[in-house]
Amino acid sequence: MRILFLACLRANTGNSTTAQRIRSHLEAAGHECELRDASAVQSPVEVANLISERKFDAGLAIHVFKAGRFLLDNGIPFGVIFGGTDINEDVKNEEKFWVMGTVLEEARFAVAFTCKMKDAAAKYWPQAISKIHIQPQGMMHIAAHIFLLICGLRRVKDPLYLVEAFAEWHERDPSICLVIIGPTVDPVFTSEVRSKLHNIDGVYLVEEIPLADVQALIKRSFAVVNSSLSEGMSAAILEAMDLEVPVLARDIPGNAAIMNHEDTGLIFSNPTEFVKLAKRLMSEPDLKRKITNNAKNYIRSHHSWELERETYQNLVQICLTDGL
């Protein structure tokens, strides 16, 4: 079966990732699935012509309004998948609400990721409840190598320094990816980062995340990366070292002050050297073990929380004493 699959495919978004995964499921079953960016569609006529030219047998869409509406009245059976903003936000708009009702009426099936999402849809369109199926999003368990870069989004942190290197590496080995985590500090620069990553595969941006979740992600990552132009003392590096996750850091004074190359971490001078060192870390488990063990011991010896507390308490006491 030839399937036209419409979804909003802006890079590094949930819908894009979900669409890629679902397409792989359909292709594994022997179907031919052509994924198209719904946000680039100018009119329903464009989709109608595409269906006629490519002779699609069926259609599928993620997001009932943004993508599903383009499959209306096109002569092929189709299904839709609720994206989130359709059921949470678009229902508040009368025109969009009416269009989505029409899409659900014509669709052969609809998919909701959660019971709550299905209940909400049933409240708005009770006539469609029998065709709404619940299917949580799947997570593929692969031996992925996730590199984590944690920083506030500003120029001095240079989060784009390794992006091209990761994109090329990811193209050769899809298990390789870089996740950039950090809040907006410089709005203009953050826009530049988003724009740069728009069409980059293998690099993902997460702008806001609770501290506890950051620590959990560090533990699950293969390595933590620092590509800053300048650092005082990177808390992310120290956190990774304490959690026994290897660190690859750019060769700048602030990083070299807390890391010894091939002893407590790996220090690189350019993107090419970074990839070379990262591959060593992947292929040499003894090196990884040595670095993480030494880094943990370094943290215990030089970055004691208890010692830091005692120091500041004593310093404040000096101030109080001097004031008497």
Image (cartoon, rainbow, N blue to C red):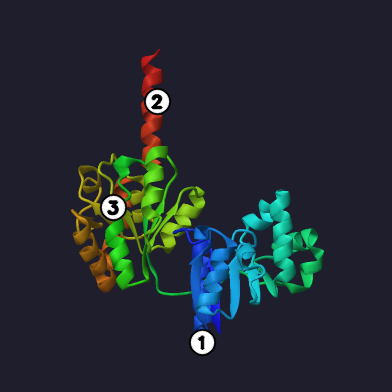
Kindly identify the amino acid type of the residue bearing the numbered disc 1. Gly
Is 12 placed above or below 24 here? above
- Give the label, 2 or 1, closer to the camera: 1
In this rendering, would 85 be left or right of 249?
A: right
- Mark closer to the chain start, 3 or 1: 1
Q: Nearer the viewer, residue 254 or 28?
A: 28
Q: Label 1 belongs to which residue? A: 30
Query: Which image quarter: residue 188?
Result: top left
Which element is circle 1 on? loop
Assess disc 1: are there few (<14), some (14-19) or many (≥20) residues with their C-alpha within 10 Å of its C-alpha: few
Is 310 placed above or below 41 here? above
In this rendering, would 120 be left or right of 246?
A: right
In this rendering, would 143 be left or right of 283?
A: right
Is mark 2 in CB contact (under 8 Å) with mark 1? no
Cα–Cα span, label 3 and label 1 = 54 Å
Q: Label 3 belongs to which residue? A: 298
Kindly identify the amino acid type of the residue bearing the numbered disc 2. Val
Q: Label 2 belongs to which residue? A: 316
Is 27 placed above or below 39 here? below
Quarter of the figure that contains the C terminus = top left
Q: Nearer the viewer, residue 229 or 3?
A: 3
Question: Where is residue 100 shown, x and y percent of the image?
Answer: 70, 60
